[in-house]
Image (cartoon, rainbow, N blue to C red):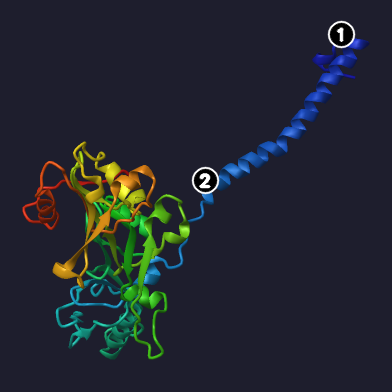
């Protein structure tokens, strides 16, 4: 019997030791084989089975729901007929002209699917194609866009050919400006109304206006506030109101009611204005508020700032466009001048954006 070189000259304990080494190696190899196979399989899956992100309405679904309008650029594809497969611009009268057809085709008011059926019937009726297979897609359109206005850094109209989210359109607009409030107003367009089923019993579209809490969306990351945006929608970020602090303060000006400063009070406003000066008449402080029913369209609300600062009187809430006036004891006419300035007569007040 032929003896392997590994066992030659191995006797007694040495032979047993070598047999044990081989046995352990075989056991480890058997245990490692399924693990390697599993790792190889998972690696292959990660490279070949990447699931695509899905959404309630895809771009193709939106295109099918889209209503064709004048000036739209359509791509018409007729299978096996390259002479007819090209881009067509919808004219001002809502029609497109297909070569070799005797008359223009009314496209305005139809969906791409409906227009495909119309073109097929026209080609069959004219005897040009016996069994036409036609597809219509929208390449460019004024309706396929979203308008982003208000307190954003780059307000304008952006092209949009599929469903997206509020965060995405805000990012396209460069984010919120310093004077943005915590509310975004979304007006639904025709496409959104069709997809979301916003119709009355007669089938007419029902306009929808949404108010989204941007603080809830941006700070807490609440996904429910990241609503879907469709082509034709408009998004307006509201501008934060301003409270004016004038008179005997160290930094007079206007302060935006943005972020954590939306709930503005007298004490907060005084803090933002760098506190009162040493000559301030704290007991004579007033809030000047617009009131159409009052004389001259405004009312003056007395504020005992001294008691509020000392904690002997409750802090008072300020509203957007309020003017907090702290008179100066060194100028008898400071109050009247301050009111004039607050009402915009020759004002040179700076507008400060309070920290969020």
The residue lying toward the viewer, choosing from 28 and 58, is 58
Pointer 1 residue: 9
Q: Is residue 216 above or below residue 163?
A: above
Q: Is residue 79 visible?
A: no
* On-image quarter of the C terminus: top left
Report x, y in % for residue 197.
Answer: 42, 79
The residue lying toward the viewer, choosing from 236 and 313, is 313
Residue lying furthest left in this view? 346
Q: How many marks?
A: 2
Q: Which mark is residue 319?
A: none
Q: Is residue 293 above or below residue 6?
A: below
The residue lying toward the viewer, choosing from 147 and 231, is 147
Q: Which mark is residue 47?
A: 2
Q: Nearer the viewer, mark 2 or mark 1?
A: 2
Q: Is residue 37 visible?
A: yes
Q: Evaluate if marks 2 and 1 touch, with contact meaning CB atoms under 8 Å apart.
A: no
> Judging from the image, what secondary structure is the residue with disc 2 in?
helix
Which residue is rendered at x = 21% and y = 45% of the image? Answer: 281
Report x, y in % for residue 49.
Answer: 54, 51
């Amino acid at each position: 019997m032929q003896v392997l070189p590994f066992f030659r000259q191995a006797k007694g304990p040495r032979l047993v030791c070598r047999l044990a080494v081989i046995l352990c190696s075989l056991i480890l190899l058997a245990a490692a084989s399924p693990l390697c196979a599993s790792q190889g399989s998972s690696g292959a899956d990660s490279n070949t089975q990447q699931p695509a992100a899905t959404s309630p309405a895809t771009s193709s679904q939106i295109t099918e729901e889209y209503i064709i309008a004048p000036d739209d650029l359509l791509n018409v594809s007729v299978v096996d007929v390259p002479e007819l497969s090209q881009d067509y611009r919808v004219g001002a009268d809502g029609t497109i002209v297909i070569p070799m057809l005797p008359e223009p085709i009314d496209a305005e008011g139809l969906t791409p699917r409906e227009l495909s059926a119309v073109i097929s019937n026209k080609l069959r009726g004219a005897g040009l194609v016996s069994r036409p297979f036609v597809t219509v897609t929208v390449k460019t359109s004024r309706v396929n866009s979203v308008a982003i206005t208000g307190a954003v850094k780059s307000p304008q109209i952006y092209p949009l050919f599929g469903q997206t989210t509020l965060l995405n359109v805000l990012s396209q607009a460069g984010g919120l400006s310093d004077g943005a409030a915590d509310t975004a107003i979304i007006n639904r367009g025709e496409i959104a109304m069709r997809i979301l089923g916003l119709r009355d019993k007669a089938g007419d579209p029902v306009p929808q206006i949404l108010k989204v809490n941007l603080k809830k969306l941006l700070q807490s990351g609440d996904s429910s506030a990241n609503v879907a945006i469709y082509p034709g929608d408009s998004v307006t970020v509201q501008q934060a109101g301003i409270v004016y602090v004038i008179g005997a303060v160290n930094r007079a000006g206007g302060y935006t009611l943005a972020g954590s400063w939306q709930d503005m009070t007298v004490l907060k406003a005084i803090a933002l204005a760098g506190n009162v000066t040493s000559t301030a008449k704290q007991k004579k402080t007033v809030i000047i508020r617009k009131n159409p029913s009052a004389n001259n369209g405004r009312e003056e609300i007395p504020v005992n700032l001294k008691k509020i600062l000392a904690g002997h009187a409750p802090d008072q809430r300020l509203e957007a466009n309020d003017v907090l006036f702290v008179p100066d004891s060194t100028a008898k006419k400071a109050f009247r001048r301050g009111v004039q300035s607050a009402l915009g007569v020759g004002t040179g007040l700076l507008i400060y954006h309070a920290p969020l």
